[in-house]
Amino acid sequence: MRDLVPGGYLFTHAVFWTVVSLVAVGTNAVAIILSVGIGLLVLETIKGR
């Protein structure tokens, strides 16, 4: 998947989280999305080691 997107992995994450944060600000889901995002970040960190 990361090979199909220009800019690679970091670019994909930057665009994805920007869109998610804009949607979250428009709703009341900010706390839920932040907790999910932190959980995913922890999982990626653990898997990366």
Image: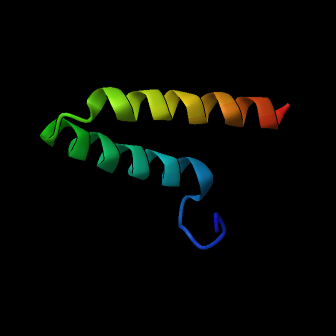
Going by the image, does 33 lie left or right of 47?
A: left
Quadrant including the C terminus? top right
Going by the image, does 15 lie left or right of 13?
A: left
x 23%, y 43%: residue: 22
x 72%, y 30%: residue: 45
- Rendered view: 26 above or below 7: above
- Residue pushed farthest bottom? 4
Q: How many marks?
A: 0
Quadrant including the N terminus? bottom right
Residue 8 or 40: which is nearer the viewer? 40
- Residue pushed farthest left? 26
Say how the picture is coloured: rainbow
* x then y, percent, for residue 41: 60, 32
Residue 17 or 7: which is nearer the viewer? 17
* x then y, percent, for residue 37: 48, 34
* x then y, percent, for residue 43: 69, 33
x 18%, y 34%: residue: 28
- Rendered view: 20 above or below 25: below
x 65%, y 27%: residue: 42
Going by the image, does 49 lie left or right of 28?
A: right
* x then y, percent, for residue 5: 55, 68
- Rendered view: 31 above or below 21: above
